[in-house]
Image (cartoon, helix red, strand yellow):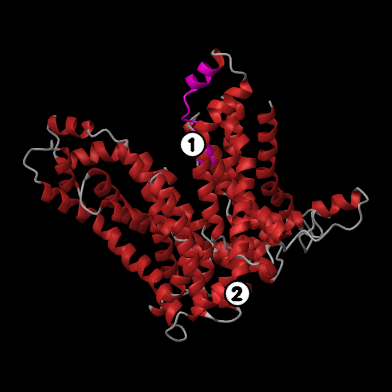
Amino acid sequence: MAGELSAVAVRPGSAVRGADRSATAWLLLAPSCLALALLFVVPIAYVLVLSVSDPQLSLAHYRRIFTVPVYTRVMVNTFVTSLIVTALCLVIGYPIAYVMARRAGWMSTVLLTIVAMSFWTGFLVRTYAWLVILGSKGPVAAAYGALGLGAAPQLLFNTFSSTLGMTHILLPYMILALYATMKKIDVNHLKAAASLGARPAATFREVFLPLSLPGVVNGSLLVFVSCLGFFVTPVLLGTPRDMMISQLINQQIEELLAFGFAAAVAVVLLVATAAVLAVYNHYAGLDRLWG
Amino acid sequence: MLAVILAALGALFLLAPILVVVPMSFSTAISFAFPPPGYWLGYYAKYFTSEEWLEPTLNSFVIAFGAMTLTMLLVVPAAFGYVRYRFRGKSLVNLLIMAPLIVPHVVSALGYYGFLGRVRLAGTLPGVMVAHAMLAVPVAFLVISATLKGFDQNLEKAAMSSGAGPFRTFLYVTVPVLRPGMLVGALFAFLSSFNEAVVAIFIGGRGAVTLPKKMYESIRLESDPVIAVVSTLLVSVVVLGVLISMFLRGRSAHVA
């Protein structure tokens, strides 16, 4: 590799030709591109093929998804739940990111530590934690009893618990996206507004909030897209009566062995995700999303 | 002030549920009762002696290590090629590299389920390893290409003009400067595999059960209290890791 890299250190316009340089680039990129084509794109293409060929060649699965009410409800439910989770993450996450970005010192450090901890704690651990908290022998149920409110309502295995769990799990992504944008906001803009007589609330509303909007878009998109295909938490905390797309895929495979139909549902999920990201890519460029 | 109060409440919402697993791990209760009726270390003993939990733990480490190695072998040259050269089809290459991050994991899982079944790698450690390596490629690529973009190539030019050959320049200038970024990239790749649940659940079968898969099955099929022990151990490792990285980096904000 060192030999190829030497080409880089030579000033452009010297002996190295454009064609050689591009050949070197392809040599460096070939292993990963080949691996991804063979070991990632092929499996995804397999899903695509399966969706129109299992058990026989037809588009019947897709017709079913968009005409049978049970399945259209799953699509709508997934969309609405994802919107709710995104909104909740934004509302809870914005003040956290704001304080992290605007307050120096221990407060920012503590918040950052908490966010990083929850970011790195696996989905299964956090899903399990919610099973304990919302369970019939959990602290919420106990609080109901202690306050004399009688038996607690069923908190688990419904849309409520799965929405809460997903919000908790995706919140760090939202906060980090917001924080990345807010951290870059030039403090001088805020000082200028204040020196021109704007009150803190007005400074926030007229200056800080608009400048933080790119972070809001990034965070919301990340959370929304992750939520569309979220698997573990809806399956473990949700209910088969109000399924999300991933639950439907799981059910079709696990209980019915309907691979063709599961594949078609997966393709719909993939297309929906890609469509959302394509719109973002058009306006902002996908590179910015994970930057 | 209002923002601080809201932030504190939000932080509590993030933190409290994670901390709940700690007392649960010392609980004597067979079911998920909180607060625990009594405390003991029995389920720790069970975790550290039961094959049923130790094997998935070992599998997770082996798979994550293998996936990380494979990912780094692919990503390091790719990042050099991508960042330092201009060539046709660059945006297409970028899309290909980012694809595993764009495609929902449940879709990839279904794909691998069928594909690895065909090539007879379903339910094997190499099968999960390869799948996890692909999923980790964009994660490591983002970190390493960012490091590479920030690299001042004048350092290399200075070394070369001082008489160092390309090999020595690479070894004594390029590698040391990029090492921290490479290590972070490798760590992210490792963790991406170690924490990955969906693909592992679909393709792990009986032969390659990872820790997240075992936890998933344990929640679904039986309420094995050992899961609280595993969760506590995992949380402890994360806490330790985050604190160490905070300590090492001082005030730097890039823990996540």
| Residue type beneath disc 1 | Ala
Residue B71 falls in which quadrant of the image?
Answer: bottom left
The residue where tag 1 is placed is A180
Q: Callout 1: residue from which chain?
A: A
The spot of residue A273 in percent (x, y) is: 48, 59
Q: Callout 2: residue from which chain?
A: A
The spot of residue A175 in percent (x, y) is: 56, 41
Q: Do tags 2 and 1 sit on the same chain?
A: yes
| Residue type beneath disc 2 | Gln
In the rendered view, tell whether residue B36 sits above or below residue A260.
above
Q: What residue occupies the far right of the structure in this picture?
A: A148
The residue where tag 2 is placed is A251
Magenta-drawn stretch contains B67: no
- The magenta region covers A176-193
The residue that appears at 42% across and 82% down in the rendered structure is: A53
Q: Which of the pair A135/A271 is nearer the observer?
A: A271
Within 10 Å of the Cα at label 2, are there few (<14), some (14-19), or many (20+) other Cα atoms?
Answer: some
